[in-house]
Every structure is written in structure tokens, then in C-alpha cells.
Amino acid sequence: MATLVCADVPKGVSVTLDHHQFDVDGELVGRGAWTGVRNLPPGAHFCATTPTSKGASTSSQSCFPTGFFFYVEGGVEGECHVVEWCAETESLVECVDDDRRRELEQRSRSDLDYLSRMLRYDPAWQDAWRGVSAHITAETIRRVSPVGSRIGVEGEPDDPSLASTPHERMLEEQLRRGGREEGAGATTSRSRDARCFYLDLPQLGGRGSPSARKFLEKSGLTGSALTALHLDKSPVLEDLLERELGGNHDELLGEMQFAFVCFLLCYSLTGFNQWKRLLVLALGSERSMLETRPEFAVELLRALRNQLELALREAEAAALVDEVLGEEKHFLASGIRGFLLSVAEAEVVPVAVEEEAARLAALVRSRLGVAGLEVEDDDDAPVVVQL
């Protein structure tokens, strides 16, 4: 178990730890200032803060959450992560003063008053959070996190092409409006240092992305082979995994979960688009999902189902999911339909893949009202085999 020390957080700040939200006020800890969270289980965690009307913040952009990932190794006695409130950015930042950090670490271990003002991590939070973060490793956090570790709207690029649907454009306009209301210089305050280092995913549509052009140049595909690539993106997925991640598909799952958390908890349009592009690539890679990497398929489908279940559980997040994902022609509906069609037409399907696909289809059909997601069950259905 580990401790997250949060120093000098003012009252009136809303805190989200993993998926649990609370406000910093006198009732939170009974007396004095809130000092952090103890008994954190091993694995990846996410902490975000939002100044509210009760806090010192008056800027519109600061009303968006700003957060960071950190990783608890487990098995390390006295493991402690120390952050402190920065009045300038109105967010939690890493404590870089060695003397102050050691003092706060010591107080978190031996000062009973300091310990009494910490929240204890509730084990009941763990299962739902692990469902959406299990593949995020310390390496994922190190590789993808921004230079300053802070994830927020200042890291969102001014790129209208990121928003491809009406609801995505509405989210982008909210971010732009928040910047304009803050002041004339706010629209230029989005720092490159706050941008996440997501993988450059090949995009085959239109003019394509730089990574897509490199892949096509290297592969030399033309004519019918290029058409087949649009029908089954497995060569693109396999090339990405080998070239960028040493063949480790768990790390790709970790980035998919990382991006979704940024979207869900920090309203990151960049996170949403990376999550979307990863899913489009994976669900469109029939051979990889059903033949080459069935374990990857099972984990991806399970992770996606857990993400939607968590988002739909929270009222505010559920409204966002309903709006953004509920469009009949949305990528999620078409992606799942296409993958289920692949499952129905395949001669052999691993049973675990077929079962996870059916569970995901049932959730999307029942909670989002998307029709046409049934898994075929007749004489022409695929042969199911145990992994």
C-alpha cells in the first residue's frame, strides 16, 4: 500500500481520484486541511483537480479538470508520492524541493494529526477502476505523459480537424470558448509541454497520416492489396506493434486506457481521438483479432466494455457518452458491427473472443440503443474453439 501526499490544497477544490470524486472542505477530514490519500493499492492511478466557485479560481479555463497519472509499485515499504498545490496553475504538481518532500513524507508516516486528515482509499473503488486501467503500466505513464505530467485543456492543440462529428465539434468549441473568456492571451496558453506523447497511428482515409504514408511506401502495396488493407487493417496493426512497441500488444491496450481516462476525467478531445483511432484500427484488424492475437482481442473487448460501463454509471459522464457515442453512424457502432460481422463469417473463432464480443454487443445495444449488434447463432455460425 502507498500514500499520495497532497500539500496545501485549498478548500473549494474538487478532487477526482481514479473515478471517485469529492470536494475539499472542512467536512472531508473533520478538521484542518486535507493532506492526501493513504492505502493506495498497486497499479496505475489518476488524480485530477478542479477549482470550484468556492475556491480561489476565477478563470474559465481553470474550471476544466487538470490531472496526472502515477504508478504504485507495491511491495515497497513506505512508498510515497508527493505533490503540492501550485497557485499559478491552480493544480497539483510534483514537489521538486527535496527537503520539503522528505518532510512531507515523514509527516505522512509519523504525524498522527497529518495522517488523520488523509482519506483512506476505499477497496470498493478498486474493481471498477482496475477494469479501465489494468493495462496502464509505469512504462505507459512514462512514455505517454506530457513533459510536466499535467494533463488538461492547455495541452489540446488548436486543430479543427480533430473534431469530425457534431458532438466532437461542440466539445472543441467549449474548450475554445473557455480560453476566450479567460482573456486575450488565453488562446495561446495551450502549452506544447502539456501535450501527451501518443503513438502516431496510421490513418488510411483521405490524404492519410505521415505514418500511413510511410507504411504504404515501405509495404509497396498497390491495387487489390491496397483495397484489402482497407477491409482488414491487420498489416497496419502488426507493423505498428512491432515498430513502436516491440510486439507488445499490452502496451497498446495501456495507451488505449490512458487516452480514455484523459477523455473521461479531463474532457480531453485529443484523448478521445486517440482512443477512437486505436479502436477503429483494432476492430478493423480481423486477422489479428481472430487468428494472430486472440488474447489481445479478448482484452480489448473486455477493456472497452469496462470503459463504457464505468462511464454510463456516472450521471454526468453518461450524458457525455450518450451524446458522443449514441449517434447511429458513430465509429463505435460501425466498428462493433463490422467486427461482429467478421466473427459471424469466420470459419473458426476462439470461444473467449466470441463471448466477449457478445457481452459488449449486449451492453451497447441495451444502454445506447444501438441496433443490429446480434451475434449470429444458427447453422452457419462459426466454429468456436477454446484458446
Image (spheres, helix red, strand yellow):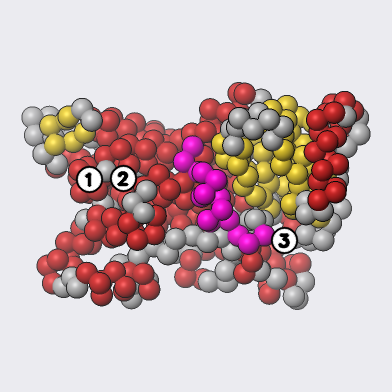
Q: Is residue 225 above or below residue 251?
A: below
Cα distance between the residues tagged 1 and 3: 45 Å
User: Residue at left 68%, top 53%?
Assistant: 66
Residue marked by disc 2: 336
Residue 30 screen position, x and y as percent: 88, 27
Q: Nearer the viewer, residue 387 or 341?
A: 387
Does the stretch in magenta take in 153? no
Q: Is residue 291 above or below residue 215?
A: above
Q: Residues within 10 Å of mark 1 (few under 14, many from 20)?
A: few
Residue marked by disc 3: 61
**Image quarter hosting the C terminus:** top left
Give the structural element (helix, strand or loop) at label 1.
Answer: helix
Give the structural element (helix, strand or loop) at label 3.
Answer: helix
User: Residue at left 75%, top 76%?
Assistant: 184
Cα distance between the residues tagged 3 and 2: 35 Å
First in sequence, mark 1 or 2: give its number.
1
Residue marked by disc 1: 292
Instruction: Answer left or right for 181 relative to 87.
Output: left
Amino acid type indicated by mark 3: Gln
Q: Residues within 10 Å of mark 2 (few under 14, many from 20)?
A: many
| Residue stretch in magenta | 134-148
**Image quarter hosting the N terminus:** top right
